[in-house]
Image (tube, rainbow, N blue to C red):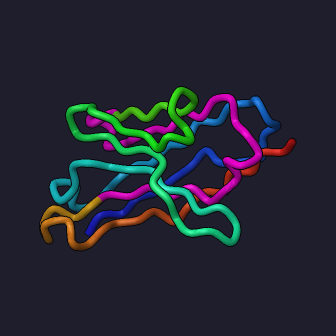
Amino acid sequence: QVQLVESGGGLVQAGGSLRLSCTASGSIFRISTMGWYRQPPGQQRELVAAITRTGSTNYADSVKGRFITSRDNAKNTVYLQMNSLKPEDTAVYYCNAPDYATGGRNEFWGQGTQVTVSS
């Protein structure tokens, strides 16, 4: 199994910045690409950003130019730098990693961290 633990959420004013971290532990060999998802109140979970082990990234259109994801493989940690935050970025943010031991059919999830952006 793989454990994912997020940190760095909180309350910030619109236009501000936050940096989320997600550290993986356990059977690290089972994961490669890692992603960030978010679930706004009353809405479905959506992909925000993803990063491969070699550093290739992709982003949701709604966060392009504002959010940056990166990773430190030596620390088994991925980051989500969130800039120019908007009230609509308010959500619980989750770290995610497909389980490659199952061909990606299963996924590992963190417990989530709340991000609240006030107007």
Indicate left or right for 86 with 2 as reference.
right
Q: Is residue 47 inside the magenta stretch?
A: no
Above-or-below relation of 66 to 47: above
Image location (x, y in percent) of residue 11:
78, 46
Q: Quadrant of residue 55?
A: top left
Image location (x, y in percent) of residue 71:
35, 35
Above-or-below relation of 93 to 64: below
Above-or-below relation of 88 to 12: below
Indicate left or right for 38 with 29 as reference.
right
The residue drawn where x is 16% and y is 62% is 100
Q: Quadrant of residue 3?
A: bottom left
Q: How many numbered marks, from 0 up?
A: 0
Q: Is residue 79 inside the magenta stretch?
A: yes
Image location (x, y in percent) of residue 97:
31, 58
The residue drawn where x is 73% and y is 40% is 86
The residue drawn where x is 82% and y is 37% is 13
In depth, the one of 20 and 52 nearer the eye is: 52
Q: Which residues are magenta?
A: 72-97
Which residue sits furthest right? 119
Q: Work out which quarter of the rendered image holds the N terminus and state it.
A: bottom left
